[in-house]
Image (tube, rainbow, N blue to C red):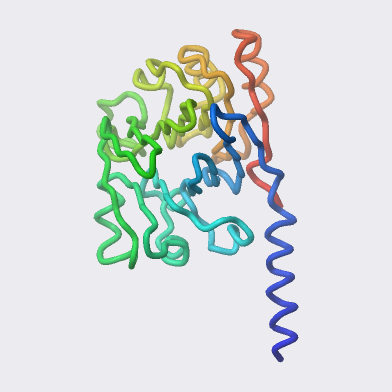
């Protein structure tokens, strides 16, 4: 029986790793940033001696074989960003959970052993030498009476580490706060109708804030996948200094 269990867990780990795409590595002023896409909005970033999980959902098995998190960022309350069961498995003593207030109120007495840091739009935290700025994320127009993502509820994030600035858009459109960003080295930008924005709007916003590298992510919408190749073509035609990196955020 013990042997069968060992084989079962080995196969589970192999399956999780086999479906995971290869990570990207980007040089920092000191060390490197390792980007491990997981799925849709979920990823693992390693930099500055810290491992950061972004919007972990879908079960802890997706993270088997990866380093345990030091910091977990959650952007919003929807199930493709906030998964209490997965957090319950991942959060151990000493883990810092950075969340908007709308997520914090849903945590109740959970997670055990974790340190919860609540950031509102415009807020900032320094966790282990990594500066975390909370950026607005919302649907346009901001005055809409019943948007999927109202202004002030969720957070995008800008992380400053190793001399680089990393932008995580969360669920948003090409809002003025995104377009006004400066000095972004690496950006992760969503595009999936009807929840966020289309490819044209995403490309236009990226051309406005000019990141050095941009990853289209969170691109599965109600009618399938957004045309990330068209996004790449539009951005690179508009500014050849912006590198668009297409990765498979939906393995398996």
Residue depicted at 62% across the width and 11% down the height? 241
Residue 52 is left or right of residue 134, and the answer is: right
- Note whether 211 is above or below 41 in the view shown: above
* Number of numbered discs: 0
- Note whether 11 is above or below 68 in the view shown: below
Residue depicted at 74% across the width and 85% down the height? 4
- Note whether 134 is above or below 243 in the view shown: below
Residue 37 is left or right of residue 171, and the answer is: right
Residue depicted at 34% across the width and 30% down the height? 135
Question: Percent x, y for residue 216?
Answer: 58, 30
Quarter the N terminus occupies: bottom right
Question: Percent x, y for residue 22?
Answer: 71, 44
Question: Percent x, y for residue 17?
Answer: 70, 57
Pick whichever, 31 or 251, lies toward us: 31
Question: Percent x, y for residue 208?
Answer: 47, 12
- Note whether 107 is above or below 21 in the view shown: below
């Amino acid at each position: 029986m013990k042997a069968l269990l060992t084989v079962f867990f080995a196969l589970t780990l192999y399956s999780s790793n086999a479906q995971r795409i290869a990570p990207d590595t980007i040089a920092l002023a000191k060390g490197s940033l390792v980007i491990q896409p997981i799925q849709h909005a979920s990823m693992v970033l390693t930099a500055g001696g810290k491992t950061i999980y972004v919007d972990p959902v879908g079960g802890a098995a997706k993270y088997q074989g990866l380093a345990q998190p030091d910091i977990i960022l959650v952007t919003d309350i929807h199930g493709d960003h906030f998964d209490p069961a997965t957090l319950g498995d991942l959060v151990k003593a000493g883990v810092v959970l950075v969340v908007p207030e709308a997520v914090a109120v849903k945590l109740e007495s959970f997670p055990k052993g974790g340190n919860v840091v609540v950031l509102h739009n415009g807020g900032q935290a320094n966790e282990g030498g990594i500066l975390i700025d909370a950026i607005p994320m919302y649907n346009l127009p901001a005055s809409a009476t019943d948007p999927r993502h109202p202004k002030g509820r969720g957070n995008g994030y800008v992380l400053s580490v190793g001399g680089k600035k990393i932008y995580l858009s969360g669920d948003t459109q090409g809002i003025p706060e995104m377009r006004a960003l400066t000095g972004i080295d690496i950006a992760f930008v969503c595009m999936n109708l009807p929840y966020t924005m289309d490819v044209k709007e995403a490309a236009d916003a990226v051309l406005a804030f000019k990141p050095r590298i941009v990853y289209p992510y969170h691109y599965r919408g109600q009618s399938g996948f957004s045309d990330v190749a068209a996004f790449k073509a539009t951005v690179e035609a508009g500014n050849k200094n912006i590198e668009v990196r297409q990765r498979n955020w939906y393995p398996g």
